[in-house]
Image (cartoon, coloured by chain):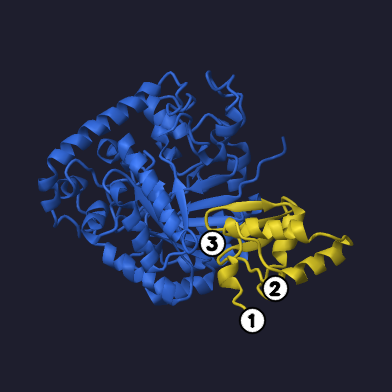
Chain colours: A yellow, B blue
């Protein structure tokens, strides 16, 4: 498990897609053979993983949105796990040093 | 307990297929073309499935590419917000067709492969398919789409796991599912000739670990366990009528694609009932929901919440009673059936090894005519294996 650096730009790993599911009132991650039911925090983080925002940017945005400080460690841990599970592209490939 | 909503629909568009794989999980009695749902009926099935909560559709078969309306169905499924997965042999998957399907809304192509080299692969498929699969893989990659692949593992290819992984990596796969054969349909019929021995399985697990070490970062590898050598059964389908449903080519709806093998049950058709009614009200979908139906040893076992008693189809196929504990469970009173199958397969495996020279020489079996009789195929195929018939 490799943690992303603050300048990494996480991106959903193709062909994964996010969908907010009205029937279940929850964010779902759709993958080729699986559907993952995300908790609200995981959903909020993955929604921001569009390949343009940096990890630092995602942290800032969520800290503002939830009016909280110190979210970085949790977000970084979650992203490392998400990369490990193949939900987002791993850092080596998704973020060549600019 | 709130109402369960299905996450996924498996749409078996047709049982027709150019391949006749010896491990095919389609029912032994294949549905014919005349019995297939038409475009309008499938569109309704997609809409009803989406209305029920399904967010994913697996178009499969048979070979779904044989349906000329596949684009229309994929487009509608995507409009409904579903993740669209196409499970294909790759025969007929040209670059032009890929572009059309991807534009229509297919999110993911899953291409099967039978072995690491054409000779064995074509013999297993009963068709000269391997080279065409390589072309299909190249076409998917050329279109810039992720390539998902799968291989069914059994005694004849379990010794080449690393070679298979290398092959798929060289074709550009992003994801490869190595799935041990599940013994239903044609695979059950051929079980003696397909089931690996415990030793082969142990060696395969080591080979898988090595392959994962080498390719793990670039190629996602998934290992689907062979349940015959487990102590406890698989949590089949995550529970009966709980997470997903399947519609067969003729419109019958099942909690799982193998369930048509349960002869003692009546399954409803979408031609007569809505999918919503079938999911919520039908006797078949309610038969094994929850825990009340369970006999001992499941009824008082703590694992029932994890494995839901295992697989109903396997219980029926092996014991004749669909409500029995899955015989894979070492606590099942029928567990000896599994042990005997392993012994019987190991005996045949030893004999095959003794006759290996003869085995390897029978090279020209593949490329069978569509519609050839099953008996003819079996005669020309790998000795001791029955090839699935082709419903015309």
Is residue B139 shown left or right of residue B220? left
Q: Alpha carbon of mark 3 to alpha carbon of mark 1: how far? A: 35 Å
Numbered label attached to residue A7: 2
Q: Residue furthest right?
A: A67
Is disc 3 placed on a helix, strand or loop? strand
Q: Alpha carbon of mark 3 to alpha carbon of mark 2: how far? A: 33 Å
Quarter location, residue B330: top left
Q: Chain of mark 1?
A: A
Point out residue A3 in the picture as x, y percentages from the top left corner.
65, 61
Marks 3 & 1, CB-CB < 8 Å contact:
no
Is residue B197 shown left or right of residue B51? left
Quarter location, residue A15: bottom right
N-term mark: 1 or 2: 2
Q: Is residue B27 above or below residue B9?
A: above
Q: Chain of mark 2?
A: A
Is disc 1 placed on a helix, strand or loop? loop
Is disc 2 placed on a helix, strand or loop? loop
Q: Is residue A70 above or below residue B278?
A: below
Is residue A29 shown left or right of residue B271? right
Mark 3 crowdedness (10 Å alpha carbons): few <14, some 14-19, many ≥20? many
Point out residue B80 in the picture as x, y percentages from the top left corner.
62, 62
Marks 3 & 2, CB-CB < 8 Å contact:
no
Visible residue check, residue B89 = no
Which label sits in the foreground, 3 or 2? 2
Judging by the rendered image, the residue that carries numbered circle 3 is B84
Q: Alpha carbon of mark 1 to alpha carbon of mark 2: how far? A: 9 Å
């Amino acid at each position: 498990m490799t943690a992303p650096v603050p300048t990494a730009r996480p991106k959903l790993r193709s062909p994964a897609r996010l969908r907010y599911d009205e029937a279940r009132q929850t964010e779902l991650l759709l993958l080729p053979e699986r559907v993952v039911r995300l908790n609200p925090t995981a959903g909020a983080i993955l929604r921001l993983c569009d390949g343009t925002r940096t990890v630092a940017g995602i942290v800032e945005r969520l800290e503002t949105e939830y009016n909280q400080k110190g979210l970085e460690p949790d977000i970084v841990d979650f992203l490392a796990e998400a990369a490990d599970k193949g939900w987002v592209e791993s850092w080596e490939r998704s973020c060549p040093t600019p | 307990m709130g109402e369960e909503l299905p996450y996924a629909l498996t749409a078996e568009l047709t049982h027709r297929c150019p391949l006749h794989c010896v491990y095919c999980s389609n029912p032994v009695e294949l549905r014919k073309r005349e019995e297939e749902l038409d475009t309008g009926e499938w569109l309704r099935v997609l809409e009803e499935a989406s209305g029920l909560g399904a967010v994913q559709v697996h178009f499969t078969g048979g070979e779904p590419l044989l349906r000329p309306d596949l684009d229309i169905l994929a487009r509608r499924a995507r409009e409904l917000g579903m993740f669209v997965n196409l499970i294909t042999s790759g025969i007929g998957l040209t670059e032009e067709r890929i572009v059309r399907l991807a534009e229509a809304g297919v999110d993911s192509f899953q291409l099967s492969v039978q072995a690491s080299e054409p000779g064995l692969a074509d013999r297993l498929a009963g068709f000269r398919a391997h080279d065409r699969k390589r072309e299909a893989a190249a076409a998917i990659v050329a279109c810039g789409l992720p390539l998902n692949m799968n291989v069914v593992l059994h005694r004849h290819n379990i010794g080449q796991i690393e070679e298979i992984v290398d092959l798929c990596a060289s074709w550009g796969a992003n994801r490869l599912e190595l799935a041990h054969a599940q013994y239903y349909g044609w695979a059950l019929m051929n079980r003696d000739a397909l089931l690996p021995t415990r030793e082969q399985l142990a060696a395969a697990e080591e080979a898988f670990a090595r392959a994962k070490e080498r390719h793990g970062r670039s190629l996602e590898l998934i290992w689907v366990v062979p349940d015959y050598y487990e102590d406890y059964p698989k949590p089949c389908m995550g529970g009966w009528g709980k997470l997903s449903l399947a519609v067969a080519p003729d419109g019958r709806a099942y909690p799982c694609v193998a369930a048509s093998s349960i002869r003692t049950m009546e399954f409803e058709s979408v031609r007569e009932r809505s999918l919503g009614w079938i999911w919520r009200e039908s006797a078949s979908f309610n038969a094994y929901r929850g825990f009340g139906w369970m006999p001992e040893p499941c009824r008082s076992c703590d694992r029932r919440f994890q494995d839901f008693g295992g697989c109903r189809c396997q219980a029926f196929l092996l014991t004749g009673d669909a409500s029995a504990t899955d015989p894979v469970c070492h606590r099942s009173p029928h567990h000896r059936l599994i042990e005997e199958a392993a012994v019987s397969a190991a005996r045949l495996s030893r004999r095959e090894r003794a006759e290996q020279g003869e085995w390897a020489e029978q090279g020209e079996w593949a490329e069978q005519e569509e519609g050839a009789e099953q008996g003819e195929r079996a005669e020309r195929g790998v000795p001791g294996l029955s090839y699935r018939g082709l419903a015309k």
